[in-house]
Structures are given as C-alpha cells and as structure tokens.
Image (tube, rainbow, N blue to C red):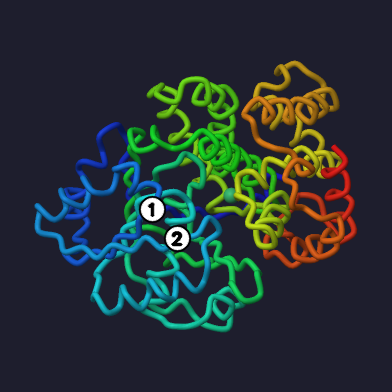
Amino acid sequence: MGERLLFSYCMPTKIHFGVGQARDLSAHLAAEGLGPSLFLVADPGVVRAGLVDSIERALQDDGYQIERFTTIAENPRESDCQLGAEACAKFGAEAVVAIGGGSTMDTAKAIALLSRTPGSIEAFAGGHLPYEDVLPVVCVPTTAGTGSEVTRSAVITDDRSHRKYTLKDARLRPVLAVLDPLLTVTAPAGVSAATGVDALVHAIEGYTCKQASPIVRAFGAAAMRLIVPWLPRVMADPQNMEARTHMLEASLLAGLCFGSADVAAVHCLAEALGSVYDTPHGVANSIFLPHVLAFNAPAAPELHAEVSRLMGFASDSSATEEAVEAMISALPKWTAELAIPRLCDLGYVQVDDFDQLAKLAMENNSTPSNVRDIREEDYRKILDATYAY
Ligand SMILES: [Fe+2]
C-alpha cells in the first residue's frame, strides 16, 4: 500500500479565524490588495439579523465602494446567479464578498465566474466551457457547516430542469476567508443543526472517499472529533461562544478535508432530494447518512470502524464490527436529539419519485468517489430503507 501512496494538496486560501475578525475585514482585504469596488453578496436573513449593515458601513468608511446583492435561494438558482453576474459586471466590481452561509458563498462563486466568463452553469459543470476568468472571491461565513469558504466548488440548481450542477475549478476557491464565531451566534436553531451535520458528512465522506489522502484524513479526523460533542452544546446553549467557536473551527477543517478530495453517496442522494423538493442540504444529508454508511461499511470495515471511534461512538479498543454497528445505531439518535426530521417526516416526499431520485443521484459527479461502487438500484434500495426507518 505504502509504495502506491500518491496525492496532491493545494490550499491557497488565506484564512483568518477568531472572535472579532469580521471587524477587521477591511484590513484583511487591503492586505490582499482587493477592491476598492466590491460586489457584496449577502443572505437576506443575515441582513435582517443586523450582521451586514455594520460590516458594510465599516468598509465604506475605509473607502470601499459597495453594491449589495441579496437574491439568494436556499438551494442557489442559476437565474439568480445570472442576474447577480450582470449587476456585478455593470458595477465593475474587483472582487465578490460573500457574507452568509453555503448558499450565499456558492452564489457568490457563480457570480464571480459568470460576471467574467458568461455561459450556462450546465456548460461549465459539463466541461463544455473553460473557467477562463473568475473574479477574486472573499468569504465571511455566518453558519458553521458548509466549508465553502475553502473549497473550489459551488452547487447551483438549473431552475428549468431542476438539476443540480457542481461548478468545480481551482479558480473558484476563495482568495480570502474570514471566520468570526460571533457571526454564527444568531443562526436559527434548525440552521445550526442542519449545517453542523453537513460539516460532519463532509468530514466522513472526505475521510472515506476514494480520493482521501493522509492530509485530507487529518483534517477530517479533527472535524469529526469536534462535531459530535460540540453540536449538541450549540443546540442546548446557542450563546455558548466556546461551542460556536469549536463548530466554526470544525466546519473549516471539514472543508479542508473534502475540498481537496470529494464528497460521496450521501451528498449524491442529498443533492437529488434538494433539487426535486428544495429540502435544506444539511437536513437531506442527515437523513441519508446512517443508511449510506450501512451500505458502504462492508466494503471498508476497518475504515468505518475508525470513523466510528473518531466520532466517539466506539472505544479505541472496540472490535471492527462492533464499532461500525455502534455508529450506525447511534447516529439516528444523535440527529434526532438535534431535532432533524426523518425522510418520512418531511411530508412532501413521494415514494413514486424514488426512481427519479436514484437516477439523479447516480448521475452526480461524486458517485464514482464513493468508497463502495454503487449502482442506481443500490441508491433505490437506500431510499426505500431510509423511508422505512
Ligand atoms: Fe455539503
């Protein structure tokens, strides 16, 4: 095995992490030579929570010119990105700054691309158009989950076909990420829970997928160790800054994990569900996680036992099979305590749609990355098992 070890890892994003870091955004932008014209992509919920006005005012006081864009969907839509790209190009922005969660950051990445290299999302994702020119992207995350602040990808839904496409290119990776745990305190409970589980799935899928490397696994292991104990603490006490800090740290580490490897079958199913029903991404991931792990574990039992031990669901001395079983039975209880619904609780999910969902999952670019080879009929069986749970 050792002599076949082969990997690359590149992480050019400048990262600033810490309570109060968002107040220094202007200095961080200046240090990177970004601006003075900034296209500010901000989540409307985050604007309502009062987080954006003060940051924008501070930037304007320091001489930055700002155009604000807030048309962002839960699952980002191509039509919004095209609209934003037009406005961004017209404004003559020199950088795109995202303040928000994963949807905001992904929308900002698509705007940064489309404003300089026009085309359809489908054409870029399908490899028919080159990512020639992309404006620099700066991310200020307000949720602890997506890790998009350090990844090279953005998931965008084509509104006409309802298909989700993944834009993926090194030029989409943010040049600067400013992570301030203070900005995550106002996230609603449901958002904190779902995005936190999304981060856990990033760590698990990055750690177990076919592209995993020792670097990726080091980041994934650190993220898993943090999320399982600290996410319930965030839910119990949303103002707990220690818990909020550990979750933002964990989502960053999980981003550094999967961002240079891939996600896998959990995300393929979650993105299919999100594209058909607009289910929040983290909720969809949480729903499928134990069922995909049960499918994957037989192909790599010791790897999955390791994952269980890292999450604290089994002791270091536990046997392989025992550790895997402990994880698969503990995960649904852990997510139920976070008040995340099951598939059958969602109400709008139709069993008649399962063939279509399985097909969409199969077509996802990340399907080949899954640790166990997976076919469309396997996805269908996982959907049935998840629904029956
Ligand atoms: Fe995700």
Where does residue 163 sit, x and y in percent of width and height?
A: 66, 69
Where does residue 79 sit, x and y in percent of width and height?
A: 49, 74
Name the residue beneath numbered marker 2: 72
Locate the N terminus and report the quarter of the image it occupies: top right
Q: Nearer the viewer, residue 169 or 387?
A: 387
How busy is the neighbourhood of tag 2: few (under 14 within 10 Å), some, or many (20 plus)?
many
Label 1 secondary element: helix
* Residue furthest out toward the front: 347
Where does residue 252 sit, x and y in percent of width and height?
A: 46, 41
Residue at 63 percent of width and 48 percent of height: 212
Residue type indicated by callout 1:
Pro
Q: Which label belongs to residue 44? A: 1
Q: Judge whether 52 appears above or below 86 on screen.
A: above
Residue at 21 percent of width and 61 percent of height: 34
Residue at 62 percent of width and 54 percent of height: 262
Q: Under 8 Å from ligand 1: the CB of mark 2? A: no
Residue at 51 percent of width and 47 percent of height: 146
Where does residue 253 sit, x and y in percent of width and height?
A: 49, 39
Left or right: 231, with 356 as reference point: left
Q: Under 8 Å from ligand 1: the CB of mark 1? A: no
Labels 1 & 2 near each other (Cβ < 8 A): yes
Of callouts 1 and 2, the N-terminal one? 1
